[in-house]
Image: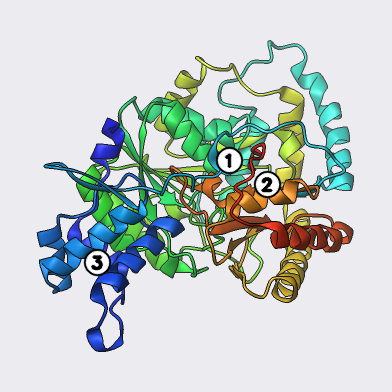
Amino acid sequence: MARDDIDRRIGARSFARLLGDWRPPGGRGLTAALAGRVRLLVLDGRLPLQTRVPAERELATVLDVSRTTVAAAFETLREAGFLNSRRGAGSWTQLPPGTMGAGMSSPFSPHVDRTLFDLAHAALPAPAGELRAAAAMAVGDLDAHLGGHGYDLLGLPALRAAVARRFTARGLPTTADQVLITSGGQAAIALVLAALVTPGDRVLVEHPTYPNALEAVHARGARCVPVPLAPDSPGADAWDLELVTAAVRDAAPRLAYLIPDHQNPTGALLDATGRERLVGLARRTGMPLLIDETLAELALDGPGEIPVAAHGAPDSALVITIGSAAKALWGGLRIGWIRTAAPTVRRLAAHRAATDLGGPVLEQLLAAWLVADLDPIVTARRAELATARDDLLARLGVAFPGWRPSHPTGGLSLWVDLGAPVSSRLVGAARRHDVLLAAGPRFGLAGAFERYLRIPYTLRADRVGPALERLLAAWHTVDASHPETEPVAVA
């Protein structure tokens, strides 16, 4: 067993919190009920794989049941393949052989065939008119830069200033020297990890979370400390901040990567109280927060929340906020940014020189025009997305009455409970019907979330109906055959 697996554990009280109200009416059948609840937690990803569970005696005390009950439940789970035990070392969660699907095997995708129905990528087409107009203005600005060398580790001043003004308008006073421009949000994540995390460090992550962030943590040689999100809550209740605090206390992570705004993939939104508690936790422990605001501009029901750093840490290096033009504008721009304390920005710029020497000038000039006048674009995007979300929810309710989709207040996608651990098999079946999907395990660690599927509401309106017809046909073919499929990258 890998050292990373051995280090991942959960205390008895935290384990009891995850179990919730598991006891059957009348108190009969405790063993089966306890084993069934643990099995569901593992399949849902709320109890991450390769997590060492509490000792039988300790758990029995906290649950106020006999040790015999806990021991029998654990034995049931071992026989079913959900626990692996080693004498003297304890027991770890796992999935039964053959459960893990191909959807978790690789972050890379084949070239996407435009004739396919793409329900894998949560991304919008460009706002063509506005982008063309901004491009024309950017070309006009280019002459002023042609006499220089074109390298800028911090990013063009015009774009840094535009991003700073946008933060200020959203409730977080920001100056241009607190902003660094990157080649997209993913580059921002990788740069922060390179500067703050060393191989072997632990990084706290939500579970599920953005898969490319997990890949970046693993590429850095760091280890993820997963904290489960409640799958059925689109609001602040999705985050159990007591569990977050316990994970920080027990694992001492070097950094926490969090998506509090329309979390990818669940769509959950953390409220102001939760944001204040996160900042307080960072201050008490010295653990920096890497806050991903990539989806923050896409609030569909109400104004959304002000940035985490606005809750008492506007000039603190403990809160590092990243954003991107990819979701609100267009992924093809490859423009992202980091906002934090000015000294930390300079430190990050110094680390950047090892990987790239700055972003393309013309694209930054173009983005500066778009960010400076973002409100009309975002307003139109929000209206279109709200309509698309509601339409998709209605269609899924008719075509798949047994599925349980989330009802997010923003973002780009639904997190759907399929009712059975068949996500990867459905991805394979859908691909044979020309539909691309992102299986639940892509958003978790070691094959978790086989009961879930992320479905974006970004597909062109006239293609949604045909896509769902094909998906329904694929759903009817899903059986125990475990077909293989090529993995699809996730945006």
- Against 197, residue 385 (above or below) is below
Q: Position of residue 453 (x, y in %)?
A: 60, 56
Which of the two residues, 228 or 333, is positioned nearer the viewer here?
Answer: 228
Q: Mark 1: few, some, or many residues within 10 Å (few <14, many ≥20)?
A: many
Which structural element holds mark 3?
helix
182 lies left or right of 400: left
Count of numbered circles on the image: 3
168 lies left or right of 59: right
State yes or no: discs 3 and 1 in contact (Cβ < 8 Å).
no
Which structural element holds mark 1?
helix
Q: Which amino acid type corresponds to the residue marked 1 in the rendered image?
A: Ala
Q: Residue at x 59, y 49 (%)?
A: 424
From mark 2 to mark 1, how far is it between C-alphas? 8 Å
State yes or no: discs 2 and 1 in contact (Cβ < 8 Å).
yes
For label 3, the residue is 16
The C terminus lies in quadrant:
top right
Q: Residue at x 18, y 55 (%)?
A: 54
Which structural element holds mark 2?
helix
Q: Residue at x 86, y 60 (%)?
A: 466
For label 2, the residue is 428
For label 1, the residue is 102
Q: Mark 3: few, some, or many residues within 10 Å (few <14, many ≥20)?
A: some
Q: Mark 2: few, some, or many residues within 10 Å (few <14, many ≥20)?
A: many
From mark 3 to mark 1, how far is it between C-alphas? 32 Å
> Image quarter for residue 72?
bottom left
